[in-house]
Amino acid sequence: MAKCLISMSAVNHAAKGDFLRGIVAAPARRTLEKEKIDSLEKLSKYSEQEIRLLNGFGEVSMKKLKSHMEEHQFSFMQSTRDFSEASIDM
């Protein structure tokens, strides 16, 4: 039974450090790991603007990430919040 559970888990979640390997650079992947975002399903619960604020997510990474998400029928959540730097409390 345990073997079955392990294989089912592998479908939904990548092994630690493997999520988006080959899609985005290591700094961006580490940032997602710190935020406990380890699947496209979890990633799709964030807006593009929220992810852009994270370390490692510039134009190139976002373009690759959005393309990868679209290939797997996922997209970012639509944002209604203002994420301009003026609205961020530091």
Image (spheres, rainbow, N blue to C red):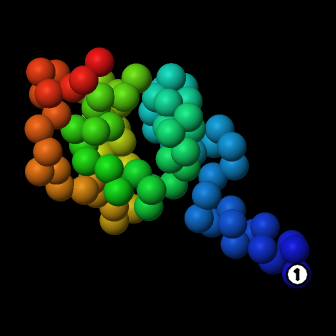
Between 88 and 7, the residue placed more toward the observer is 88
Q: Residue at x 63, y 52 (%)?
A: 14
Residue 45 visible in image: yes
Q: Residue at x 35, y 57 (%)?
A: 45
In the rendered image, the vertical position of residue 88 relative to residue 63, given as above or below? above
* For residue 90, side relative to residue 11 (left or right): left
Number of numbered discs overlaid on the protein picture: 1
In the rendered image, the vertical position of residue 55 relative to residue 52, given as above or below? above
* For residue 35, side relative to residue 50 (left or right): right
Between 81 and 20, the residue placed more toward the observer is 81
For disc 1, the marked residue is 1
Q: Residue at x 33, y 61 (%)?
A: 74
From this viewpoint, which residue is outermost toward the bottom?
A: 1
Q: Which amino acid, by three-letter code, is at mark 1?
A: Met
Residue 21 visible in image: no
Residue 75 locus on image (x, y percent) = 28, 57
